[in-house]
Amino acid sequence: MATQHSRAAGRLMLSPAVILLLGWMLIPLSLTVYFSFLRYNLLMPGMEEWTGFLNYRFFLTDPAFFDAIRNTLLLVGGVLLITTIGGTLLAMLLDQPMWGQGIVRILVIAPFFVMPTVSALVWKNMFMNPVNGLFAHLAKGIGLEPLDFLAHAPLFSIVMIVSWQWLPFATLILLTALQSLDTEQLEAAEMDGASPLCRFFFIVLPHLARAITVVILIQTIFLLSVFAEILVTTNGGPGTATTNLTFLVYAQSLLQFDVGAASAGGVVAIILANIVAIFLMRMIGKNLER
Amino acid sequence: MARAVTPQRRAVNTAAAWTIALLIFFPILWTILTSFKTEAEAIASPPSFLFFDWTLENYVTVNERSDYFLHFMNSVVISLGSTLIGLAIAIPAAWSMAFVPGRRTKDVLLWMLSTKMLPPVGVLIPIYLIFRDLNLLDTRIGLIIVLTLINLPIIIWMLYTYFKEIPVDILEAARMDGASLRSEILYVLTPMAVPGIASTMLLNVILAWNEAFWTLNLTAADAAPLTAFIAGFSSPEGLFYARLSAASTMAIAPILILGWFSQKQLVRGLTFGAVK
């Protein structure tokens, strides 16, 4: 159906988007790679020189780097564990017949729409504060010593805050997937005497497998870049206890002005994200075929 | 899928779901309630839940002591601006991919999505330096450019999936009747595409409103949207709970309301069609 004419028009309409995205991807990306091979400090302008892999050696042997990698993995892993398990259970509950289902769903989804700086500060000050926070009041109420969450369990606290933000996302996606499950299959299994646990593991979970994978992949991409929550709660500390890779690169470049080393860190972050992206793109690509 | 269950079972479901939902929603509710307390009541022990003297003074204080309105307008201009420019670029692109697909269309689409997976920190430094040299740091236009580009793949993707659902036959019929490309777009496609475009716009305004990597790193005072303004409460300002709550409530209320309308688009827009 496509004529020569409409094909040319189509290409013309596509080109602005392609050119912009190509520029957005290629220019900063090649600059980051280029900077990562330079000795380049913003405090010493005009002193840039080629240093080969020195930045990478510096960055990869910096103890802060290993802390950052560990924190990144713990943060991503912890949030994924909480949100996928919690999201699956919550989605199954929300899928049951009940009164006021619409309102329940609206309440559950709400945290996803709260901007990161607000949720981080509300949790930090109004809940986790050791003197006036609600948790401190609760602890005192049952005769316990209030815990200074962000000082004594900083990474755990950030995992909790980020999980609260992402649980609605996982729940909503999994609920959508759950609603496409054929209920006749479940009823047949029930009549044949399959226990609820059996039905969950052999019918519901296999049906959800694909959606769970998508939730894990997409969340990983976003969670690798958690930044605002760390900036406003702990600023990466105490020490490097909550510095993830994103925050380390930010601190290296915009606080210590070492563009070279920070760029090397940026390249490492890109490589990490790409490993995840490859799997995600493959799944999306398969879906496009259908 | 309403299955028949006993009323008892339904009551148990309802109680469990409402308990969990209220727990999840509680931090937001608590923020809204605290915003109507005085500073003294906000830190009172034990905290009062509903029985306190409701006051609007915090909303007045936040507006008087800071340029709240400026930051609010920055958020509005940046999120709407980036979404509208994004739509202007994305609509033709999605249209051509949906209706005049070539051999490479799928690859182009996948490649566009893959740019969304680039971690922002990987391009932070060059963008920061380029913006510094072009005097774009802490300007609304600078942020609009960045947010347009980071959300463009999602906009194109969503529009593509909506346009794909429009029956092609109707376009052919219009063409048979001698409609030009222009009138085809104007009179046939647009009316059918408007709901999809509106949904896309809604989700992207929300995403841009809440974006907190670039807004924090590229703004200081003049162009700071609400994300960056609230970050300023981190210390010691944040210890004024009532004031923090009032500022937060005002920052999240509009998007919370928009967000509740956009549940379906959220699944479509953020899973890139991998879940249906």
Image (cartoon, grey):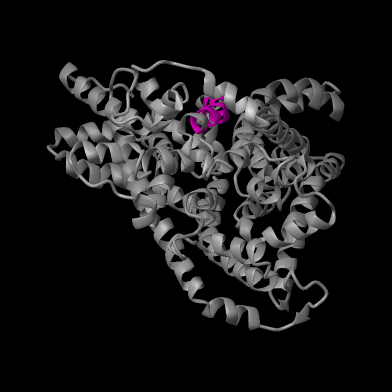
State which quarter of the image contains the N terminus of chain B.
top left
Residue A278 drawn at (x, y percent): 54, 61
Q: Quarter-wise, where is residue B59 in the image?
A: top right
Q: Is residue A211 visible?
A: no
Q: From where the camera sits, is residue B116 visible?
A: yes
Q: Nearer the viewer, residue B229 or A268?
A: B229
The verdict on residue A1 being magenta is no
- The residue under the point 48% across, 49% down is A233
Relative to A196, A30 lies left or right: right
Classify residue A151 as left or right of residue B190.
left
Residue A6, percent across and down? Answer: 83, 39
| Residue drawn 37% across the image and 18% down it | B52
Q: Quadrant of residue B187?
A: top right
Q: Position of residue B157 (x, y in %)?
A: 64, 41
> Does residue A133 lie above or below B53 as drawn?
below
User: Image quadrant of residue B13?
Assistant: top left
Q: Main secondary structure of the magenta part?
A: helix
x, y percentage for residue B144?
74, 41
- Looking at the rendered structure, the number of numbered marks drawn on it comes to 0
Task: Tell me the magenta residue range.
Answer: B244-256
